[in-house]
């Protein structure tokens, strides 16, 4: 009897289980049936397929589901963290939008849909899918900049040879790989990094081009000439070289400014220049230290092409290191205008070289001092133009327009800068009254008393030279360390003694970008004066003696080491300042 009761109970449990499974399958079939489609009635019982009842989930399956759940949770945490740094609306990369779309799709995929096959109790037959195999189309948030073909900022890093224009299609949607002279165009840093790692900066050379022979050695028409038109166009598509010219009378003081950044790298100029030429009068007795400071300020992108001295006159020429291969040998000469002086404080120092096919002459000089010694200064000028023996071995680019009696007529572009010592024909009281009115950049009332402007207008000095409009205060004579003009008993009249003038064989080759004085350097009674110029460059011939990439390597290493050590000291000082605390007792 007991056995029969047990069998009846087991049979009832089995029937209830079977009824429960049958109800679940019917319900599931109703759910998966499309609501808009009415199934055709059929009398064939075989058309109604009853799915096989699922077996009991194994314990091992539960562990697998738990593992998938934990993996999904950890992935979502990592994705949420990384997505926070990639959803910046200011980013221009195309990956941001795709990640946002992926997160939305991932959330939708995580939710059960009508077609999801569920196990009893709401469990899914398959684990949640966290990594999607279908990626959305990526679109940039903003239009990427087009590849520039003739801008001033173009260099070899993003220029393509005419025979390899197919590169442009590859780079069409990427940013321009330009150098530090990019003029503010939007770019994608990720695209730049990927392009730098994918494509070489050197254009490929076809074998047939290498096999072809050229018998036009030294000609402007030679294909592939080092100084020819093709190479010039590669580095300077607009054929404009930017030149920085500076002059400073250091008053023979040993101490140097703490920083030369405001002098050599004006804050209101976006780009550094291609060529830096600095002339010094009454230079510091530590000449090598002065050159190291120049190298330290300009950094590893520049090398010292030439350095020379004549007594206390110093001349330093720095050039971008990737342009040194296109310079000829540098020649220099000196002229002394005060023979009786044992220390050469007055005279001139000139350096010349050819860059591609354009010859340059740079002269720094110190003329006779004194308010009324205008004629002596004119004699100094004449002695210098007649006495500078340049060029020596470098051929003249245009010998038909040369003058053996004037060195400035033997070069294409001439820059003359220094302490010319020309004064204002006005007493101290009159000049002070004009300065007290704070003229700003309008110095016309002062300049009408300037001796140099008058003599240049009369043609007695600097024939053929030009000077940009002066819009800064007189640069002489200041008390050391302040902006007050001479307060000693001599009460010297403020004057524009420090000047930069220029001359060109072809009118319009030199364009002035800026002409100013650096008022932040106050270690001398003179303020430094500098000018920024754009100079037109022409292709040259390969038959001139080249500098062969020579530069002062020892100075380069010293300047870079000094630059690094100063940066480490600065960071350490900032760190110490943050860690320090000040206690106050009230």
Image: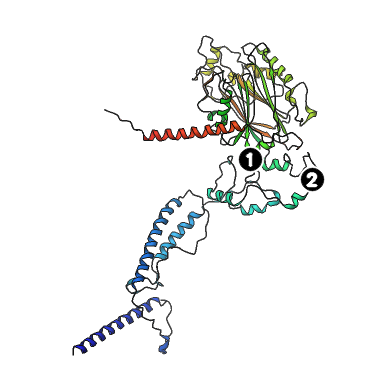
Of circles 2 and 1, which is in front? 2
Q: Is residue 271 left or right of residue 377?
A: left
Q: Along the polypeptide, which appears first: circle 2 or circle 1? A: 1
- Point out the image quarter for the C terminus: top left
Total tally of numbered discs in the picture: 2
Horizontal and vertical percent position of residue 411: 73, 28
**Label 2 belongs to which residue?**
214
Secondary element type, mark 1 = loop
Q: Which quadrant holds the N terminus?
A: bottom left
Neighbour tally class for label 1: few under 14, some 14-19, many 20 plus, Cα within 10 Å: some
Q: Is residue 223 left or right of residue 122?
A: right
Residue toward you, 495 or 153: 153
Q: Residue furthest top?
A: 489
Return the x and y of residue 362 as percentages of the image width and height.
Answer: 67, 26
Q: Is residue 297 visible?
A: no
> Where is residue 155 drawn, in percent x and y?
64, 42
Left or right, residue 386 beside residue 267: right
Instruction: Locate residue 579: give its quadrant.
Output: top left
Q: Report which quarter residue 477 is drawn in.
A: top right
**Distance between the alpha carbons at the discs numbered 2 and 1:** 30 Å
Residue 152 is tagged as 1
Q: Is residue 64 visible?
A: yes
Q: Quadrant of residue 530?
A: top right
């Amino acid at each position: 009897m007991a056995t029969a009761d047990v069998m009846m109970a087991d049979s009832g449990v089995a029937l209830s289980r079977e009824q429960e499974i049958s109800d679940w399958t019917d319900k599931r079939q109703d759910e998966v049936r499309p609501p808009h489609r009415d199934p055709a009635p059929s009398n064939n019982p075989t058309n109604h397929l009853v799915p096989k009842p699922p077996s009991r989930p194994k314990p091992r399956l539960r562990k697998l589901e738990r593992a998938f759940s934990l993996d999904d949770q950890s992935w979502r945490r990592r994705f949420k963290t990384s997505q926070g740094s990639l959803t910046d609306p200011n980013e221009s990369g195309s990956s941001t939008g795709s990640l946002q779309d992926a997160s939305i799709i991932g959330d939708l995929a995580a939710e059960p849909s009508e077609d999801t096959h569920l196990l009893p109790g709401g469990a899914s037959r398959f684990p949640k899918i966290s990594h999607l195999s279908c990626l959305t189309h990526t679109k940039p948030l903003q239009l990427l900049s087009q590849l520039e073909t003739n801008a001033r900022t173009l260099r070899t890093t993003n220029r393509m040879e005419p025979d390899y224009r197919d590169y442009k299609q590859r780079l069409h949607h990427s940013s321009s790989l330009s150098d530090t002279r990019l003029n503010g165009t939007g770019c994608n840093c990720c695209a730049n990094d990927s392009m730098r790692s994918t494509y070489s900066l050197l254009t490929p050379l076809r074998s047939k081009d290498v096999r072809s022979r050229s018998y036009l050695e030294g000609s402007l028409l030679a294909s592939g000439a080092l100084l020819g038109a093709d190479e010039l166009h590669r580095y300077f598509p607009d054929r404009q070289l930017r030149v920085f010219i500076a002059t400073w009378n250091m008053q023979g003081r040993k101490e140097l400014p703490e920083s030369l950044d405001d002098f050599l790298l004006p804050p209101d100029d976006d780009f550094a220049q291609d060529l830096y030429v600095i002339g010094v009068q009454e230079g510091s007795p530590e000449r090598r230290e002065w050159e190291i400071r120049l190298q330290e300020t300009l950094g590893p992108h520049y090398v010292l092409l030439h350095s020379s001295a004549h007594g206390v006159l110093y001349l330093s020429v720095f050039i971008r290191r990737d342009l040194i291969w296109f310079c000829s040998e540098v020649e220099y000469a000196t002229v002394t205008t005060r023979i009786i002086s044992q220390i050469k404080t007055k005279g001139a120092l000139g350096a010349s070289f050819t860059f591609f096919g354009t010859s340059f002459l740079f002269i720094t000089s110190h003329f006779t001092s004194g308010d009324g010694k205008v004629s002596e200064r004119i004699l100094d000028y004449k002695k210098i133009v007649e006495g500078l023996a340049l060029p020596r071995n470098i051929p003249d680019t245009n010998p038909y327009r040369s003058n053996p009696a004037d060195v400035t007529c033997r070069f294409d572009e001439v820059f003359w800068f220094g302490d010319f010592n020309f004064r204002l024909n006005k007493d101290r009281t009159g000049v002070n009254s004009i300065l007290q009115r704070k003229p700003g950049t309008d110095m016309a009332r002062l300049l009408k008393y300037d001796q140099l402007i008058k003599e240049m207008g009369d043609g007695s000095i600097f024939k053929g030279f030009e000077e940009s409009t002066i819009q800064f205060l007189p640069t002489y004579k200041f008390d050391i360390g302040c902006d007050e003009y001479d307060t000693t008993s001599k009460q010297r009249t403020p004057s524009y003694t420090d000047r930069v003038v220029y001359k060109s064989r072809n009118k319009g080759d030199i364009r002035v970008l800026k002409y100013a004085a650096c008022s932040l350097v106050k270690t001398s009674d003179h303020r430094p004066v500098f000018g920024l110029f754009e100079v037109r460059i022409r292709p040259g011939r390969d038959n001139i003696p080249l500098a062969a990439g020579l530069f002062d390597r020892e100075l380069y290493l010293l300047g870079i080491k000094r630059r690094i050590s100063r940066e480490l000291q600065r960071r350490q000082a900032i760190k110490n300042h943050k860690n320090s605390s000040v206690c106050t007792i009230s």
